[in-house]
Image (spheres, grey):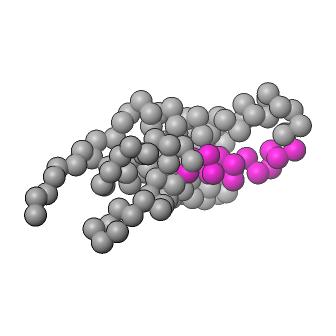
Amino acid sequence: MTIKPVSTQVPVGPVLVAGIGAQLADDALYFLLPPTAALSPLSGVVAILLTALAARLVTRNRVGSGVARTGLAVGALSAGVGLLLGGLGLIAVLLAGITVVAGVAGAVAGRHLTAGG
């Protein structure tokens, strides 16, 4: 059995675009389509879902531990941007923690990354 080396490097450019874009996309949506502003109380949830989706898109051609690391980078960057924009309140910090987990979960969910899968 031969073990092939797998790159675990995190692509910086796509991670930056995905992390920042996940936080700012809902705000752009409210600006471009004013009727969607009724969803503004759910901005945190929308940003979390967009972070998971962005992590999934960034990691679609990656394999091995690089998938989880890239998802973590997207989630952490998105959470950091969210905290910078929203402040350091209790709810914001809780949402930031969930955002980091969502980045990893969005990247790894359904990929069968284990040796037996």
Where is residue 40? Give x, y as percent: 80, 44
Q: Residue at x 10, y 64 (%)?
A: 1
Residue at the far left: name it. Answer: 1
Q: Which residue is drawn at 75% across and 34% down?
A: 29
Q: Residue 39 in magenta?
A: yes
- 65 displayed left or right of 77: left
Indicate left or right for 8 with 42 as reference. left
Snapshot quadrant of residue 64: bottom left
Q: How many labels does the image show?
A: 0
User: Does residue 74 lie above or below 105 as drawn?
Assistant: above
Indicate the position of residue 93 as horizontal and vertical percent values: 59, 54
Q: Please state which of residues 38 and 116 is positioned toward the viewer in this rendering.
A: 116
Q: Residue at x 83, y 31 (%)?
A: 33
Q: Judge whether residue 75 can be spotted in this image.
A: no
Give the residue displayed 35% in from the left and 46% down from the top: 62
Residue lying at the far top of the rendered structure? 32
Q: Which image quadrant: the C terminus? A: bottom left
Residue 82 included in the magenta stretch of the image: no
Q: Which of 96 and 113 is in front in this view?
A: 113
Q: Residue 36 occupies which quadrant of the picture?
A: top right
* Residue 102 shows up from this direction: yes
Question: In the rendered view, would you say 86 is above or below 17?
Answer: below
Q: Is residue 24 left or right of residue 6?
A: right
Could you say where residue 73 lies in the image, as x and y percent from the top left? 42, 45
Stretch of the chain drawn in magenta: 38-52
Front in this rendered view, residue 74 or 86: 74
Q: Residue furthest bottom?
A: 116
Residue 90 drawn at (x, y percent) = 65, 57
